[in-house]
Image: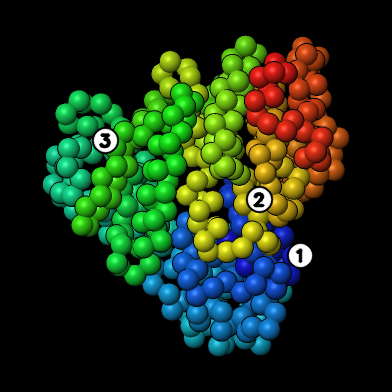
Amino acid sequence: MIIDEQADFRSLLMHHVTIHWPDAIISAYDPTVAGHLPDEFSGAGNDLILLGSGHGDRDGVDVLRRFLRRDKFPPVVYFGTEEDQDEAHTLRPDAHFIRDYINHDSLIVGLMDVLVARERIASTSSLFVGDMRTGIHPLVKGYRFMRKLGSTEHSGVYLAERESTHMHVVLKVLRQMPGKQDSIGAFDRFLQEYETIAEMDHSNIVRIYDLGVGDDHAHIAMEYLAGGDLRTRIERGIPEQAAVQYLRQIASALFAVHSKGVLHRDLKPGNIMLRKDGSIALIDFGLAKSAKLASEITDKGEIFGTPYYMSPEQGHGNSVDERSDIYSLGVIFYEMLTGEKPFKADSAMGIIYLHGNAPLPLLPTRFAQFQALLNMMLAKMPGDRLQSAVEIEEWL
């Protein structure tokens, strides 16, 4: 997350980050437009906070001091001025740069050092403290843990085997529980994620099997999707018939999500998984992330998503609706057919500019029958787009 009042400076940092990490998900926040972040802001879900010194009527060092005082706050990298560098240095942020003298290589090395240090800290406080020879967690009964798949600030994600059925599942386990510092909000979001996904009984949305809540743990057991993600499938090449079938399934799932009043906002091939039978399932459609953003910051002044798949309105931090997800799906459909992304540039801001200003991409002649549909999905103005995901099936 990048926080500073100057749009050019936020764009500069975004440029440096996305050159090295092109798939980074970045939210850009302007405290003079959207208002100062409240004291309840925990930074949850962010690997790094890139904090500039520009905060309107508030001193940047004071904001840094407030952030560093908060328990379990993400690592903070501060970009200050020559005048405030001594004061900022005494607060010991995770990294410190002078904003007017940023060198790309030294910046990336500094950010990588912070990320490596954080990973080392996390690895020394493992969630699982039971008998690792058997893989049995002392709190989550009935599951044999196989391997770690990923983690966030508040939860770990693991491949596990349900002992009663020997079925493989993905187990998401909450690290912190209600009543302990900032865990209440995380616990509420955890339950909300379960309740929202569980309500969506759709064949192309990941299945939820179990919710467990105890005095000192909470977990969700969900479907394990063994076919890998769509990103890997695209790299291998997707036949036309399969691409169309995937499009039908994703559109059907999106319509179900939208019907519940939920926006995905980060639709991309990495969030779309395949089962062994070749069917599609959405695994992460922004539910917990949407809840987090709604509770911690306003919608103004933030950009959330992956630039390659952002709609023009999302890329400029404007309000979005279902039609923004339809645009993202249009980008994915183009990529499934051609193996290439429709818009490429040397920076995230360059990609965002192309989404809003470049001509609509043309499919190769052999896919000409889909050009009209693609045009309706990738229209620059939301009013010119398909208005509902269900219309994709009608066009096909």
Which numbered circle lies on residue 38? none
> Hey, which quadrant is residue 3 in on the image?
bottom right
Look at the numbered disc 3 and give the secondary structure of its residue: strand
Can you give x and y, in whole percent of width and height, for residue 387 in the image?
A: 72, 33
- Residue under label 1, please give it: 8
> Hey, which quadrant is residue 362 in on the image?
top right
**Mark 3 or 2, nearer chain start:** 2
Q: CA distance from mark 3 to mark 2?
A: 36 Å
In the rendered image, the quadrant that contains the N terminus is bottom right
Residue 104 visible, this angle? no
- Residue under label 2, please give it: 19
Q: CA distance from mark 2 to mark 1?
A: 16 Å
Label 2: how many Cα within 10 Å (few below 14, some 14–19, many 20+)? some
Q: CA distance from mark 1 to mark 3?
A: 46 Å
Look at the numbered disc 2 and give the secondary structure of its residue: helix
Q: CB atoms at circles 1 and 3 under 8 Å apart?
A: no
Relative to 4, say whether 348 is above or below.
above
- Residue under label 3, please give it: 160
- Disc 1 residue type (three-letter): Asp
Can you give x and y, in whole percent of width and height, for residue 300 in the image?
A: 68, 61
